[in-house]
Amino acid sequence: MDDQTPAEDDETPNRDLQPDHLQMQNQREIEKRIASQEIRKLKAKNEKHHTIWFGLGMFGLIGWSVAIPAVLGATIGMWIDSRWPTPYSWSLMLLIGGIALGCFNAWKWLHKEGGID
């Protein structure tokens, strides 16, 4: 009447009691994700609360840190071009150099403020 042997009946309940390897691996992944989310939440809670004014101030500071070296480079380049004419445009070269210097300064400042090494 029953097609299953007694040995198969004995294994079925034991299989349910032992956790599946894949299930344990998924559980570990979920635990890791929950732990990382909790760490992010605690970190965000401990950091200073930045307002919109802080963001606008940072935006302005980065803009000026790029604009000032660029304008200085162009101005010095125009002065050199007016004093000593050459086939090369010192205005353009120093403008590009000023922009590069300003971008480097802004990048360094952002990494310092963001705590990135």
Image (cartoon, rainbow, N blue to C red):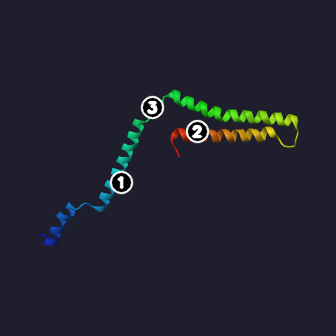
> Does residue 83 appear left or right of residue 9 in this picture?
right
The disc, 1 or 2, on the residue closer to the chain's N-terminal end is 1
Give the spatial CA distance, label 1 vs label 3: 31 Å
Rate crowding at label 3 as few (under 14), some (14 to 19) or many (20 or more) other CA atoms within 10 Å.
few
- Identify the image quadrant of residue 3: bottom left
Residue where numbered disc 1 is placed: 29
> Does residue 86 appear left or right of residue 116 in this picture?
right
Identify whether 110 is placed above or below 1: above
- Which dot, 1 or 2, sits closer to the camera? 2
The image position of residue 39, as x and y in percent, is: 38, 44
Give the spatial CA distance, label 1 vs label 2: 36 Å
The image position of residue 44, as x and y in percent, is: 42, 38
Tell me the number on the disc at residue 49. Answer: 3
Residue where numbered disc 2 is placed: 109
* Residue closest to the far left: 1
Identify whether 116 is placed above or below 83: below
- Identify the image quadrant of residue 108: top right
Residue flagged by tag 3: what amino acid is it? His
Rate crowding at label 2 as few (under 14), some (14 to 19) or many (20 or more) other CA atoms within 10 Å.
some
Residue flagged by tag 2: what amino acid is it? Trp
